[in-house]
Amino acid sequence: MPPRCLVRGSISVSSTVKDFVLPGQTISSTNLAKYTGGKGANQAVAIARAGAIVDLVGAVGQDGFWVQDELRAAGVGVEGISIAEESTGRAIIQVNELGENAIVLYKGANYASLPVQTIHPDTTYMVFQNEIPLASTVEYLTHAASSQISTVFNPSPMLSPEELKAFPWHQLTWLVVNAGEALELCRALNQEVQDTSKRSAEDVATPLILQLSAYMPTTNILCTLGADGVLANFTLPGGPKITYLPAAKLQGTTRDTTGAGDCFTGYLVAGLMRLEKKHATIDDYVSVLRRCVQAAGMCVEKRGALASIPFAADVDARLN
Ligand code: ADP
């Protein structure tokens, strides 16, 4: 049977505002388009578009049946989505003219309490973000660790310093952070942070990743660097291997970076799921990463989060 992935994560309805709200300012949303989002949903759709089988476990409210339908139509397994009493989570996404984003979240049904569900026996990966109760993430993570299921954690929004210190990092297989999150994580875990001014993104991220690796030596770490690509530290037999990959060359300009990290994570998981059965080498990991940066680059060329996640065939056509 083909391997499956379980995403335990958030599902939200989003609306967008052009530009960032300044103190004292009121701006109107350009629309109240009801489009599906949330990091859990985005990553699940990215995994499906990257060609892997994915089940999403989360919750929406009575107002969210259409969201479930949209996710099903996008190829995501939705049997694990519960209908909660709270209304569906909401995200208001502000996008400025540079394509940067700022996000306001209403937790809603994402914080409904859900008991751990029966896990499909073919599940080889579990994926987590931080838009649901942390206790539920840890519960699933612990279950995965005791069942030889690999795990991927994208701690966004970032956990509090206390939560970071208490998190069972030794159970985690893959950590995915952006540069800001890597810095926050190092500071919270009391790791030494060097002066990060006036150097390239790669130079800045390398000591951060090394510090994090010292703290969680059995976890593979990926640090995405926006337009500067990605830095990875793979825990391979024979010692860790730091690898840098530049970002993909864009066709046109950056339109909207919303969801680029989710797209990257989705393609990462789908790529890793394919490697699972054999003894992966550094070259295998680098080719997975190459596909991730290509997919994430295509994602920033288009507006929207979920709508801009490319399909595997289009990503592979650009790679060849
Ligand atoms: P997040 O969205 O989680 O903050 P990043 O901004 O680091 O994550 O972006 C994730 C990945 O998306 C990057 O590693 C890169 O491959 C791609 N990406 C993001 N911004 C750009 C850009 N302006 N040009 C090309 N690729 C980009």
Image (cartoon, grey):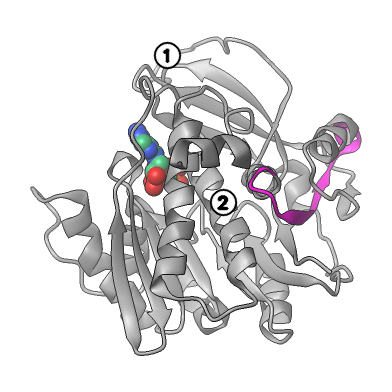
Q: Residue furthest bottom?
A: 238
Neighbours of disc 2 within 10 Å: few (<14), some (14-19), many (20+): many
Place of residue 4 in the rendered image (x, y in percent of width and height, measured from the top left) = 76, 64
On residue 97, the disc is none
Is 225 positioned to the left or the right of 288 in the image? left
User: For the magenta stretch, what is the residue range?
Assistant: 49-64
Residue 123 lies, with reference to residue 177, above or below; the image says below
Q: Which quadrant of the view contains residue 181?
A: bottom left
Image-based side of 287 in relation to 46, left or right: left
Q: Residue furthest front?
A: 320
Mark 2: which amino acid? Tyr
Where is residue 135? Give x, y as percent: 68, 69
Ligand 1 sits in quadrant: top left
Disc 2 is placed on an element classified as helix
Q: Amino acid at mark 1?
A: Gln
Residue at image coords 41%, 88%: 237
Residue underneath mark 1:
25
Q: Is residue 216 visible?
A: no
* Residue 191, x across and y down, in percent: 27, 75
At 80% across and 38% down in the image, what residue appears? 71
Would you name the residue on which mark 2 appears? 267
Q: Nearer the viewer, mark 2 or mark 1?
A: 2
Tell whether position 59 is magenta. yes
